[in-house]
Amino acid sequence: MNLAKICSLHKSQVLLFALIAFVVGIAVGSLLQIDKFIIFCLILILAAGLIFLLHKKIVFIIVLILLCLVLGIFRVQTNNIDCAKNDLICNSNGRQTKFLAKVYDNSQDIDGQKIKLSSQGVIVGNKIYPVKGNVLINQPLYPKYNYGDVLIVNCPLKAPEKFEDFDYPKYLAAKDIYSICPYGEVRKINSGQGFWLKGSVLKIKDKLSNSFKRSINEPQSSIIRAMILNETGDIPQNWNDTFSNLGLTHIIAISGSHITIIVSLIMYLAIALGLMRQKAFWAAAIGILVYIIMIGFPASAVRAAIMGILVIYGQKIGRSGSSEMLIILAASLMLVLNPLLLLYDVGFQLSFLAVIGLIYLSPFVERWLKIIPDFFQVREMLTATIAAQIITLPLIIFQFGRFSPISILANILILPIIPFLTVFAILNAIIGAIIPFVGNIMGWVSWLFTFYWLEVSYLMKKINFFSFSFKMSWWAIFLCYILIGLCIFKFKNKNKNIDL
């Protein structure tokens, strides 16, 4: 980019480049250790430069981008937790510890409960010494512990350790957990002590989950609960393996399509009840927030929620933002809150890469698929699937070490029914919680869609004779995305020349 182009940049374009620089700074700060004092001095120098160079547009923009880059590095550095310098429960790692804690989150699978606890204090004798921090403990399936329960836990705390090629400590650090307890004695002494709003939302979630359990048989019920309520622990392991091998796990993960359907339903109902479109925005925004609280803030859903709120807010004020701005703004907001998501949360990485693929690769793929008729939006579904598969393939191979070519066909056959299943399942859960008899009737429709999904998956598994398994290094994945980026750049330039 030459100086003339820099001068002609619009304010929104400058903001876009500044946000990209911030995300790059997060990546640099995550990979390199840089002295905090040096970073702080750079921030002061660059900030002073902005003030004195305000009238020189070219230099001002360059300094602003550099400042955002350094701020990204600084944000990572401020996120590093040193247990020795903080009064946290992780100071007790390596010894038997008795402590008081509240249940913050509880995920279940066939093996038991994985409970995230928020420490309230360490118990020594008859005294409680206030100590904060989070602990992940494993417990049997029963008794079940719920959000807001107050527990006394006595267990050998330990720091999480790396195993094989998986950086488990960083993975848990992204969730603000620095201590684990594989086993221990647990006693509940109180309940209902969490934040009232979250507690109320989780009670609604339990009612919706029970509505699914009453109206839909297994294993369809567990799959729908995973897709709508993020209750992934009840899916039978054989189906988890099948979805993973066929590249179908993204259907279960709550993402942009789910949020879009929920926003559309809320907006439609709000307008049908007589609300103006501008007021319906607030109903949709509150509905998305409640839903995100209900499902536990998964990265893909949070990204989709931020983008969804930004889109409908733009509609409310009569402005529309570019796709690039929305995605980088959503990423930046999430990374400001938790910079470790960028390198250590696979859901976050796949979520944003898939959206990037839809934005930049879909036009390229669509030109190759013009000969395919678009009956029932088959071509559109195929275009979106291939674009997302191409952009996420290097990361999937890097993270999971395998890829199955049959996954594209499986996605083509299953994806068209997912919007209908999502709508019916949501209505099924809500109506079933209020009028169980009607919910039981609607459950047959949800069951039928899911039955088709499972039958197709079973058939694809039978004909999936081969899959590729191999390792990929950081350098290889970096080169893959450089190559994909160059191809996109060349394709866009070629299109511009054709248009001229």
Image: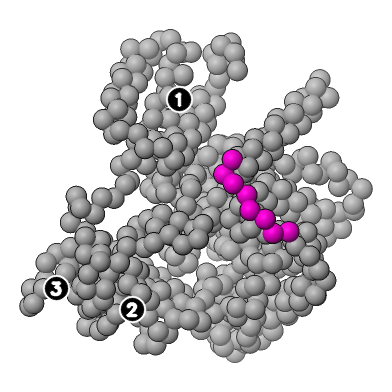
Residue 408 left/right relative to 340: right
Segment colored magenta: 468-475
> In front of the other: label 2 or label 3?
2
Q: Quadrant of the N terminus?
A: top right
Tell me the kind of residue under disc 1: Ile
Q: Quadrant of the C terminus?
A: top right
x 73%, y 34%: residue = 487
- Which quarter of the figure has residue 364? top right
Residue 123, which numbered label?
A: 3
Residue 65, which numbered label?
A: 1
Location of residue 269 in the rendering, given as x and y in whole percent from the top left corner = 57, 63
Nearest to N terminus: mark 1 or mark 2: 1
Nearest to N terminus: mark 2 or mark 3: 3
Tell me the kind of residue under disc 2: Tyr
**Residue 469 highlighted magenta (yes or no):** yes
Residue to which mark 2 is pinned: 183
